[in-house]
Image (cartoon, helix red, strand yellow):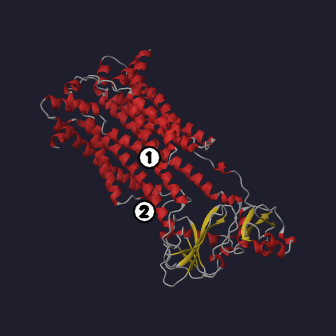
Amino acid sequence: MRLSWRLLRGGGARGLVGAGLTLAAVAVSTALLLFAVGMNVAFEARADREAWRNPVAAQGTAAVAVQSARPEYVGERIISLVEIAALRPGVAPPPGLARVPAPGEVWMSPALAALARELPRDELSGRFPAGPVRIIGDAGLVHRDELVAVVGRAADDPAMVPPAPSLDRPLNMIPPTPVAGFAGEHGELASGYRILALIATVLVVVPLLVFGGAAARLTVARRDQRLAALRLVGATPGQVVAMTVAEAVVVAGAGALAGLVVYAAAVPLLAHIPIGGGGWFAGDLWPGVLLVAGVLLAVPLLVGLSAAAGLRQVVVSPLGVARRQTPPGMRAIRLVVTLAVLAAAPVVGGIGYGAFVIMLGLGFLSINLAGPWVVGLIGRITTATARGPARLLAGRRLVDDPRAAWRTVSGVALTGFVAGFLGLLSPSGGLMGVRPAGELRLEVPAREVAAVAKAADARLATAGVPATVVVSGPGKDQVDPREKSPAKASEKGTGKAAARLLTAKLERDDPATVDRARTALAGLSPGHSATSPADDGREGGMLLNDVRTGTIVVLTVSFLVAVASAGITAASSILDRRQTYALLRLAGTPLSVLDRARRAETLIPLTVMGGGSVLAGVVCGLPIMAGAVSVTGAVVLVGCVVLGFAGVIGAGALTRPLLRSVTANPAPRPD
């Protein structure tokens, strides 16, 4: 440790700059890794808080309450309506409620209570029992902007009686269920979000791991020269490895702590990312003490192992390193493995989500495996076809150290994989189609259809909502119940189904009119809400919007990794080749030629590997594409490619002053 510290200090300002680059790379990786882990924890916390609304039927024990759940709608927003009837006193309440609601008692989320005060009574609050409204605590809410209402009912209330056979149509409701408690279970939508979060985590974490491992190899040439000199004067392989790991772990540990500080500062901003209809509780985005400690330990360990893994040549052939011999070329088996993984991706990915996620991770790693070999091949082609000094220098550099050249472009190449995977799948709201909002449907018992239809007519007229009420059923044409007697209507309801659909066709479909009609029809059919075809697509539309938001977030994180990787590795490459640049300048090579060569050795492999990675991402996304390709997705994909190239070019431009600095005094240094 003392020797490592002395050598680090003895390297002067440039040595400290190299350590600073590693620290910055680790800080970026740690912050984004904490974000990826935190999002999974946040989705899990959301699912846990929402579980009580998905009742589990009492099994083998006496029920303590009857619970039902269904959606209500106001404007284009979804209200989660839960109705509870206690069957005995002293029942433990659902999360967020101080007690089980008594019959006629209403509890609302803060957002719904504020909206009920804001809108006229005949548009929202008239649907619920009159009286004081109590507020649901955060423990019972998915997010603070969620609209939730809990209504207390009597055990013999018609709304709490298990319904007759329903029409064969998705009403998105949970019928009255006797429950032994309010533990509940995770809903299908919550489980779907968790699966999407897992896929997004793989798309983010694998490039981060590659970037974190590459952080240990920054300024590797200078460090290898130093360690090779120590080996030649008698240092043992164990001492060399210990010194390298110690230096890498200390620097990476400091970087991990810096990344934790950055993530903590970013949490209030990240909490505003809208998913599932709203933002996040800041506490949800904290992974917890154990997970944070695990990340802070795992990142320095990864960097230390990566640094040790790169010492093989120093340990085996220190003289070759000291003489700067070109290492042996890599084998083509790297490319064969990559092609095999990509060919198997569409087949294996269709087996299940677990296999798909594993194949996705392998696709990432295989690209990282084949990258250096392809870069070396590109270097040989570039050298053979060079027609000027800049291109010749670039090609020779790619051939000499393809691994270092790959580290410069790997971030953008892996981001291209993410863009290819997600870009074409970026959905637009238009995929749900245009559905009518002015046709409110209400499921009613067939024997009561005529009476309910007349009551609906009267209520809509009283509310000042012009509408036509008709009734339909399975295999029946729509009929106007006002022209039939209750007896005949009842006879028509004794067939295959014991329910009919009452449809109120509104003359106007503006949000205020539709909400007044909903309120007027509330309570006509206990346990059911009036919904429109547009309402049936609200949840799917929200999911599509969330997928689009998630795509933007994942691509943003990926681009942060890519740009940071390109900038940091470009600066590290200049420091590694400081003496080479100085000797070229001393031989009379113009600085502009060196700069063009540096750009060429980045852009040439980036063009090839970036395009190949995008194609590989599209191939791995085929199992879930299923015709979901949209014009919006194609635009996103093209935008990603353009931004990727712009980011790399910009990062290279920012390191130009460093190139000028290391070549300002071309005299060779004794180190």
Quadrant, the N terminus: top left
| Residue pictured at 45% horizontal, 59% vertical | 42
Asked if 670 appears above or below 58 in the picture, the reply is above
Residue 598 in sight from this viewpoint: no
| Residue pictured at 43% horizontal, 35% vertical | 367
The residue labelled by disc 2 is 283
Task: Give the residue furthest to the right.
Answer: 483
Q: Position of residue 311 (x, y in %)?
A: 24, 34
Image quadrant where residue 400 sits:
top left
Between 77 and 642, which is closer to the camera in this rendering? 77
Give, as a three-letter code, the residue at label 2. Gly
Image quadrant where residue 292 sits:
bottom left
The residue labelled by disc 1 is 202
Instruction: Give the numbered dot on residue 245.
Output: none
Sequence order check, earlier mark of 1 and 2 = 1
Instruction: Report the side of 139 relative to 662 (left or right).
Output: right
Q: Position of residue 343 (x, y in %)?
A: 49, 34
Instruction: Report the side of 236 relative to 611 (left or right).
Output: left
Instruction: Report the side of 592 relative to 125 (left or right).
Output: left
Asked if 521 appears above or below 353 in the picture, the reply is below
| Residue pictured at 36% horizontal, 27% vertical | 402
